[in-house]
Image (cartoon, helix red, strand yellow):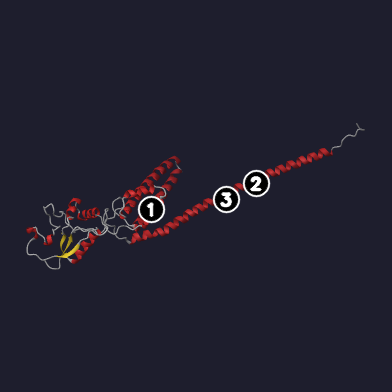
């Protein structure tokens, strides 16, 4: 073995702020092993997690371990003149993690460092995994646009069927609308839970959206609070944001004002229609009142004329009588 080879050594130390349970879960996921086997590493004795590495490979493994909360280190391999497999000994009392061992105090059997994922795999339709703030915005925008398109298609189909059979149109529209609502809720919960996992929070906290007043603040926290930089109990961090994610997230800056303009326009149109309706009603009421007043004036004039005629009739004198 040459002098330019290195190994990854771990003696049970963790990075500041990382809980032991979280670190063990991260290691179990990275090493594809069970938590019970991983616990055998936390004895306080140095353990060689990976041997015979070049310097760049050692740095790669060390970065992945630090993302999992493990405070490991790189040490240079020392040349030996005997076979580790035959003597079952390691320098400095370290055990070879990449070689199976029968001792109950030996490291797990899983090969370490062969496929240490730096980032988690993205899955949309699941409550497992993690997503960051920008990806949460991007996925939410896609979900919103898809919902609007689906609602438009359902409305168009409903109007087309209503011309033939209004009853069928109402039933079909109600069923499709309910299915769209259920799909929207399910996907929204899945995306929201993954965002909570990125913060290191339980997905059950998504139920806070059902609490009055809290549901007006809680969604803002999901958009503002940054996620955990490294791995947490819900897995490795999500991949870096792609250009598509950044573009979709930035489209919210245009989508939100557009929706506000549409809502304000609809509100103004409704207000103007109501105002016009009130003006028409007032005009009709004034016209009816004017007609009634005119009719009353005509009646009064007729009565005055009749009284004048009665007053003008001659009265017989006593002599004529």
* Observer able to see residue 141: no
**Mark closer to the chain start, 2 or 3:** 3
Q: Quadrant of the N terminus?
A: bottom left
In the drawing, does residue 145 fall left or right of residue 3?
right
Determine the residue positioned at 43% across, 47% down: 155
The alpha-carbon separation of the residues under discs 2 and 1 comes to 55 Å
Helix, strand or loop status at disc 3: helix
Q: Residue furthest top?
A: 321
**Mark closer to the chain start, 1 or 3:** 1
**Mark closer to the chain start, 2 or 1:** 1
The alpha-carbon separation of the residues under discs 1 and 3 comes to 39 Å
Residue 45, x across and y down, in percent: 15, 58
Residue wearing tag 2? 287
Determine the residue positioned at 76% across, 41% down: 302
Q: Quadrant of residue 51?
A: bottom left
Q: Quadrant of the C terminus?
A: top right
Badge 1 vs badge 3, beta-carbon distance below 8 Å: no
Residue 312, x across and y down, in percent: 84, 39
Residue 119, x across and y down, in percent: 26, 58
Residue 297, x across and y down, in percent: 72, 43
Q: Nearer the viewer, mark 2 or mark 1?
A: 1
Instruction: Indicate whether 287 appears above or below 249.
Output: above
Residue wearing tag 3? 276
* Along the line of sight, the residue nearer the viewer: 179 or 75: 75
* Observer able to see residue 171: yes
Q: Residue furthest front?
A: 44
Q: Quadrant of residue 177?
A: top left
Determine the residue positioned at 60% across, 46% down: 281
Q: Which mark is residue 129?
A: none
Q: Which mark is residue 219?
A: 1
Helix, strand or loop status at disc 1: helix
Q: Residues within 10 Å of mark 2 (few under 14, many from 20)?
A: few
């Amino acid at each position: 073995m040459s002098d330019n080879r290195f190994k990854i050594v771990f003696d049970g130390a963790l990075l500041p702020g990382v809980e032991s349970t979280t670190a063990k879960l991260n290691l179990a996921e990275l090493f594809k092993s069970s938590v019970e086997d991983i616990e055998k590493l936390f004895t306080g004795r140095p353990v060689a997690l990976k041997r015979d590495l070049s310097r760049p490979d050692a740095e790669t493994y060390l970065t992945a371990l630090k993302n999992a909360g493990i405070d490991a280190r790189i040490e240079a391999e020392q040349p030996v003149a005997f076979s580790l497999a035959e003597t079952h000994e390691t320098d400095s009392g370290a055990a070879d993690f990449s070689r199976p061992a029968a001792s109950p105090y030996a490291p797990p059997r899983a090969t370490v460092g062969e496929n240490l994922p730096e980032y988690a795999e993205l899955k949309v339709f699941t409550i497992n995994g993690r997503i960051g703030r920008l990806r949460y915005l991007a996925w939410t925008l896609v979900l919103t646009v898809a919902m609007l398109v689906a609602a438009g298609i359902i409305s168009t189909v409903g109007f087309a069927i209503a011309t033939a059979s209004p009853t069928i149109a109402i039933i079909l529209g109600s069923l499709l609308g309910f299915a769209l609502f259920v799909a929207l809720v399910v996907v929204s919960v899945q995306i929201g839970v993954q965002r909570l996992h990125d913060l290191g929070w339980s997905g059950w906290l998504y139920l806070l959206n059902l609490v009055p007043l809290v549901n007006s603040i809680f969604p803002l926290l999901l958009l503002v609070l940054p996620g955990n930089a490294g791995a947490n109990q819900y897995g490795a961090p999500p991949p870096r944001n792609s250009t598509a994610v950044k573009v979709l997230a930035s489209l919210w800056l245009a989508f939100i004002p557009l929706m506000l303009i549409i809502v304000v326009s609809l509100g103004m149109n409704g207000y103007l229609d109501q105002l016009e309706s009130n003006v028409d009603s007032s005009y009709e009421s004034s016209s009816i009142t004017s007609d009634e007043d005119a009719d009353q004036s005509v009646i009064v004039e007729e009565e005055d004329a009749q009284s004048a005629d009665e007053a003008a009739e001659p009265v017989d004198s006593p002599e004529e009588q």
